[in-house]
Amino acid sequence: MHVGTQRCCAPTEQRKEDAMQGKKPKAVLVPFGYPGYPDSYLTRFTEESVEALKGLGIDLRCSPIVKVRSDTAEARKILREDAPDFLIVLILSWIEAPNVIDVVDEFSEGPILLWSHTMFKEGGEWMTLGPMPGAGVIRQAFEELGLNFKFVYGMPDEEKVRREIGLFARAASVAHRLRHSTVGLLGYASMGMYTACFDHLPLREKLGVEVQHMDQYVVVKRIEEMEDEQVEGLVKEAKGNWEIGQGVTDRDLTISLKMYRTLKDLVEEFGWSGLQIKCQYELSKYYKSVPCIPLSMLGNEVPCSCEGDIPLIVTQLMLHYLTDLIVGYGDIHTVEEDRILIGACGYAPFGLCDGRPKVGKTEVLYEGVANCSLYREGRVTLARLGYRRNRSFKMHIVTGEAKKPRPFREVGCLSYPSMEVILDGSGDDVAQNLTSQHYAIAYGDFRKELLELCGLLSIEPKVT
């Protein structure tokens, strides 16, 4: 086990492959045709579609072509057996709509990609099997049935088609993974943060994420039961790899690293996909050891954050699943015309920091060892889930270029892990749409991916 900027890897056996290294979107393709057209065309276009989909990294199973009502039974059987992330309804030619609906009934609660082929050129002549007229009937039928679908049209070799399918496939895979995710919550919202609270059943129903709640006492008790010898190696490694500030004692490091081991053990024991912990005031004032360093270490391995903010950790989980990257978070401290300053009071995943981890002792507003590193520079996406008046979800999305921040600190505190983000939009647009102070941070531009996911999950997006 390495301390500092270790590679991102998940703790439980299943998530070792899925969560941090990426999971292929899984789909069932059901091609639909019509008995009046030559099988050679239908077979050829199906094979070309399969090749294109597999080229996008989709784990695909294709049913036999459905041309008549009796063909639907096999397609339904495959859907039941495979339990895919999403269904692809491929319209190869004119079709009879009841055949499609028969199959879709088997997957009416899941995301559906409705893909219609178009015209093709053969021997210098444009030809058609009539797929778009058939797709027109199906698209409207899907809308009236209230199905969760996206409509794309074009041939398998078209770049636009592949791009749109790729976006949908990733979003559908993330939506599926969210429904099999549990977030660990230790404590609840800190310091009366209304925006950190959540509605449990609507969260489970609409986004699929489960929350398992425990008290911070579990953490304290396990730390106290752990022998110092169990973290001796971690302490030695930290002293060799970190820049340790004045006042940080070996005892401080021992307690912080015991807390890291405890949190990691809890994640493994309960199979959590993400972790939230309330720091203020139970750990920061009474126990006198903030979880900043444990979370900065664990953040390389699993999405995590503090102050009991569930909408934040779910946003982090979404970004992580979309990107397969380490995801952090920060508080928006100031907004200017073209930039914002964002950073958390002692937390940032070490894997996102610039250079060796820097840690220091804090004793004013909170007590313990905190991360004082700066974020590295680069393109970033910031995002935050929130509730609307009717308790449906919305998401604020911000993009820009992360730069080294001007020197600053909160009165009485150490320097924060932070960045200045030169915005793609305007600072005032960001300010007028603030959804809380906490925003998830991922390196790269993931606007399109987030918008696709929002569409799939009925989240109202706002990009500034």
Image (cartoon, grey):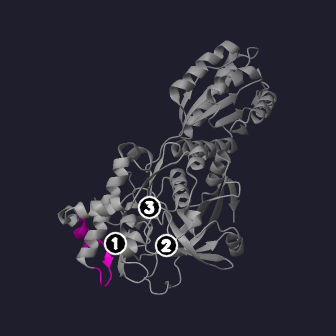
* Label drawn at residue 187: 3
* Label drawn at residue 344: 2
| Residue type (three-letter) at the residue carrying disc 3 | Gly
Could you tell me residue 70's position as x and y percent?
66, 12
**Marker count (numbered):** 3
In this rendering, position of residue 187 left or right of residue 78 = left
Say if 126 sits above or below 230 in the image: above
In this rendering, position of residue 49 left or right of residue 133 = left
Could you tell me residue 28's position as x and y percent?
58, 30
Residue at x 56%, y 66% (from the top left corner): 439
Q: Which residue is mark 1?
A: 287
**Residue 235 lies within the magenta run:** yes
Res. 95 visible in picture: no
Circle 3: element type: loop
In the image, which residues are magenta? 234-248
Could you tell me residue 409's position as x and y percent?
49, 84
Could you tell me residue 425's position as x and y percent?
70, 70
Comparing 429 with 163, the one in front is 429
Q: Hey, which quadrant is residue 256 in on the image? A: bottom left
In this rendering, position of residue 166 left or right of residue 218 = right
Circle 1: element type: loop
